[in-house]
Image (cartoon, grey):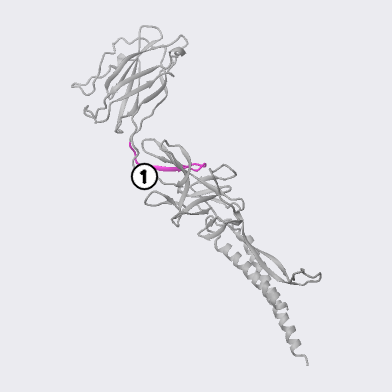
Amino acid sequence: MAFDTAISGINAATADLNVISNNIANASTVGFKSSRAEFADVYATSLLGAGSNAIGKGVSLVGVTQEFGQGNVSFTNNSLDLAINGGGFFQLSNQGALEYTRAGAFQVDREGFIISNQGARLQGFQVTPTGDISGQIGDIQIDTSLIDPNPTGLVDLTSNLDSREIQPTVPFGGPFDAFASPPTAPDPSAYNATTSTTIYDGLGNPHVLSLYFVKTATANEWEVHSLIDGVTTSGPDTLTFQSNGQFDPASLPIEVNITGWTPPNDAGAPTGAAAQDLVVNLSDTTQFGTPFAVSSVSQDGFGAGQLRGLEIDESGVAFARYPTGESRALGQIALANFNNQNGLQPIGDTNWVETFASGPANVSEPGTSGLGVIQSAALEESNVEITAQLVELIVAQRNFQANAQVIQSEDAITQTVINLR
């Protein structure tokens, strides 16, 4: 009878309305993916199949398929808000059980782990003790403890000494000691150029390394004197240039070696830091007919520092920044993809889990293997198109009303048959 057929149509329309209403309800849910109800017609069959004049027996819901299209990306002020621009899912560990999501509203728990709103830990590639990204996947944790200081061992200086300078009339003198009574220091008339940079001892204390350049009476020859915290540590060292204003390649590297330096405190007494050796590399120094200038100066030491900020680049690498200017990688966010995304099982909280139909997760770095890139301080909005959903809502409502009308008509026909005399 048509009653059963119409009831199947009402059930199908009700399922369609439920799917549409769920889409509309989650239109503002970060990382949500809209769904659609899919139906198929029903025919009565026997072991030998359906007859050639078989009349359909209604409709059935064969599946609710999610649409994993990209949602709009909206920007925020939180560096831990992450959006995936392209394919892939964030991988989460919920007490060891792996879940997957596109919702990137993350935060840090009291132990420093990056977690979702439900407390699941974000997964990523771990870093080695040397700061390199490894292939091992685990919880990404932000280390908020002080970083250990690193004593300076190498200073690189790139500068130009003015070839037009003449020998000072005042001898440079020395040695000098800023902690002596009275303190002694180089006479500004005794040198042609000077530059300074900050270096660090083994306890992370900063010190000032100063280099003084003195033109000699010999053409293309200079002396360099080094002082740390105003105390002579070495020198003079001789720099001899060729007629083209550069060092003879056979003489490279040109270095000033400071050995056995004992770091002092502000009063000139030892700080307790170990004695250290320093190398000042001057190989890139030139002597051209332009004023003295320092192009670059760098050193490999840094002091102890507390975490000051966190940055995540598009490849998913999380960088911690410290007030010393030092930065280090804490891990790299891993993204997962599946051969059959529609085989994933939604479990709520905008999360999915792997199933046999989805296939195993293919985990890799962002921007590789067809995966998208990470956008920090941004969230992916729901991909629900409200206008389209409202139109589909009207269609589902009409389908429901039409099937209800079929029941009403069938009831009238049945009543007519009953009333036959």
x, y (%) of residue 307? 37, 42
Q: Measured along the vertical axis of the image, is residue 165 above or below residue 261? A: above
Q: Measured along the vertical axis of the image, is residue 341 above or below residue 177? A: below
Residue at which label 1 appears: 144
Residue with the most extreme top position = 218
Residue with the most extreme bottom position = 421
The magenta stretch is 304-317
Among the 4 quarters of the image, the one containing residue 406? bottom right
Residue 30 is inside the magenta segment: no
Q: Which element is circle 1 on?
A: loop
Residue with the most extreme left position = 181
| Amino acid of disc 1 | Thr
Among the 4 quarters of the image, the one containing residue 327? top left
Q: Count numbered badges in the picture.
A: 1
x, y (%) of residue 62? 66, 64
Dominant SS type (magenta): loop
Residue 309 is inside the magenta segment: yes
Left or right for 17, reference 299: right
Crowdedness near tag 1: few (<14), some (14–19) or many (≥20) residues, C-alpha within 10 Å: few
- 91 or 281: nearer the viewer: 91
